[in-house]
Image (cartoon, coloured by chain):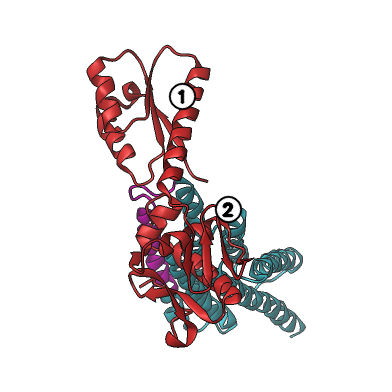
């Protein structure tokens, strides 16, 4: 009985950390979306996204520490590690995209970047919802399918955005700058899909 | 950063060289183009220069000479650009736009424009109340074709409006034509309600 209670307590710690990670990726994505709509008049949003990135590192570290120090885990250890890494990647790429705006002296946003950040925000919202309900091991199908659909949408927007950069007569410096930013946001969306696939695996194993 | 000059070797470009040269020189606000290549016929050199190349240097040549020819081509371009721009002040409403000082004034006080904001204002003011499409504004002020989705023109019009509102609060100078572009026309503020914050992006 005492062993069961301990295992459940360990499980709660994992689930709480993933719940925190879900809220953190959603906050970072919402901030990036605001940043890209308000740029260059943003006030301190880049700094807030950096704080999310540091918070993401802290959560990942806590998950790994917990894995190393607990005997039992409610989810397979390799899935815990993979999920924590994918969630960390989302915030890392989001922060890099935000950082590039200042680093590259971007004068004004591009509409396609605003569309991409909207897709990232929606994907993170679905992931955060799924993560908050993970401990129920219930039906997360709707959220996970939605993340996959959004990833396809992100791919389409990225392809069109890159095509617009390679039209005749565009400033080559603009191509270099925006190609990097589009790719970082796309990588963040791809990491959302990776996290969704891992959640799917966890649910299948638990059935 | 804007590209001011390009050095090309037609021999390295192969059969596409003439098409490339024609496209490069035909671009809006094209950079200075210097062809630096091996021995060529008079017909080839004439063709290159007529397509728009600014100079033709035959290899072997000293790098210093190539550099000096590039600098001379850029100087000629700049001199041409400057002489093409009117320098007379434009007066509209309370605003006096002074191309000789790259600044606008209201009652003798500078509005405090950046170089790009000034160029934008000067271009729109010089269009004699006609609507200037966003793509045209970008091409003239930034010197390149505008990428689809680029919001630079809208952002700079917004910045310019804010500065003009502070310096000349009783007047509206920049008018939005949604989905098309912008028009400069000095009007007293109460005549044009609701126009101030709009952007042309459609």
Q: Is residue A53 visible?
A: yes
The percent position of residue A206, horizontal first and vertical second, equals 52, 76
Distance CA(mark 1)–CA(mark 2): 31 Å
Secondary structure at numbered mark 1: helix
| Chain of the residue where label 1 is placed in the rendered structure | B
Q: Which residue is mark 1?
A: B69
Name the residue located 76 percent from the left edge and 66 percent from the top edge: A69
Q: Colour of chain B?
A: red
The percent position of residue B165, horizontal first and vertical second, equals 56, 76
Q: Is residue B34 above or below residue A122?
A: above
What is the magenta range? A147-171
Per the rendering, the mark at residue A104 is 2
Secondary structure at numbered mark 2: loop
Per the rendering, the mark at residue A177 is none
The percent position of residue B155, horizontal first and vertical second, equals 50, 67
Q: Is residue B193 visible?
A: no
Q: Main secondary structure of the magenta part?
A: helix
The answer to which image quadrant residue A106 occupies is: bottom right
The answer to which image quadrant residue B108 occupies is: bottom right
Mark 2 closeness class: few <14, some 14–19, many ≥20 residues within 10 Å: some
Name the residue located 35 percent from the left edge and 58 percent from the top edge: B136
Q: Colour of chain A?
A: cyan
């Amino acid at each position: 009985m005492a062993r069961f209670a301990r295992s459940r307590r360990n499980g709660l710690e994992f689930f709480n950390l993933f719940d925190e990670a879900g809220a953190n990726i959603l906050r970072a994505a919402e901030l990036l979306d605001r940043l890209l709509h308000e740029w260059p008049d943003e006030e301190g949003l880049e700094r807030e996204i950096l704080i999310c990135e540091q918070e993401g590192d802290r959560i990942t570290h806590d998950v790994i520490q917990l894995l190393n120090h607990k005997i039992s885990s409610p989810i397979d250890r390799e899935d815990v590690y993979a999920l924590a890494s994918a969630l960390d990647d989302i915030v890392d790429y989001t922060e890099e995209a935000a950082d590039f705006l200042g680093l590259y002296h971007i004068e004004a946003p591009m509409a396609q970047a605003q569309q991409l950040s909207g897709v990232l925000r929606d994907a993170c919202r679905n992931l955060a919802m799924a993560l908050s309900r993970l401990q129920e091991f219930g039906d997360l199908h709707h959220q996970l399918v939605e993340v996959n659909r959004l990833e396809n949408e992100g791919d389409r927007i990225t392809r069109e955005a890159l095509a617009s950069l390679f039209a005749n007569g565009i400033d080559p410096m603009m191509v270099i700058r925006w190609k990097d930013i589009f790719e970082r946001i796309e990588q963040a969306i791809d990491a959302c899909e990776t996290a969704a696939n891992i959640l799917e695996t966890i649910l299948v194993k638990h059935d | 950063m804007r590209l001011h000059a390009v050095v090309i070797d037609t021999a390295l470009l192969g059969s596409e060289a003439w098409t490339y040269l024609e496209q490069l020189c035909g671009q809006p606000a094209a950079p200075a183009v210097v062809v630096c290549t091996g021995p060529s016929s008079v017909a080839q050199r004439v063709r290159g220069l007529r397509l728009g190349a600014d100079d033709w240097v035959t290899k072997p040549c000293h790098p210093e000479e190539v550099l000096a020819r590039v600098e001379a081509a850029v100087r000629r371009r700049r001199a041409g650009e400057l002489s093409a721009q009117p320098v007379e002040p434009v007066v509209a409403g309370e605003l006096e736009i002074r191309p000789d000082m790259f600044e606008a004034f209201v009652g003798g006080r500078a509005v405090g424009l950046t170089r790009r904001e000034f160029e934008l204002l000067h271009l729109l003011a010089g269009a004699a109340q006609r609507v200037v499409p966003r793509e045209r504004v970008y091409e003239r002020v930034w010197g390149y074709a505008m990428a689809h989705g680029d919001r630079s023109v809208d952002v700079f019009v917004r910045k310019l409006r804010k500065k003009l509102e502070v310096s000349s609060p009783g007047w509206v100078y920049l008018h939005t034509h949604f989905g098309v572009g912008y028009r400069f026309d000095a009007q007293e503020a109460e005549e044009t309600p609701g126009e101030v914050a709009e952007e042309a992006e459609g």
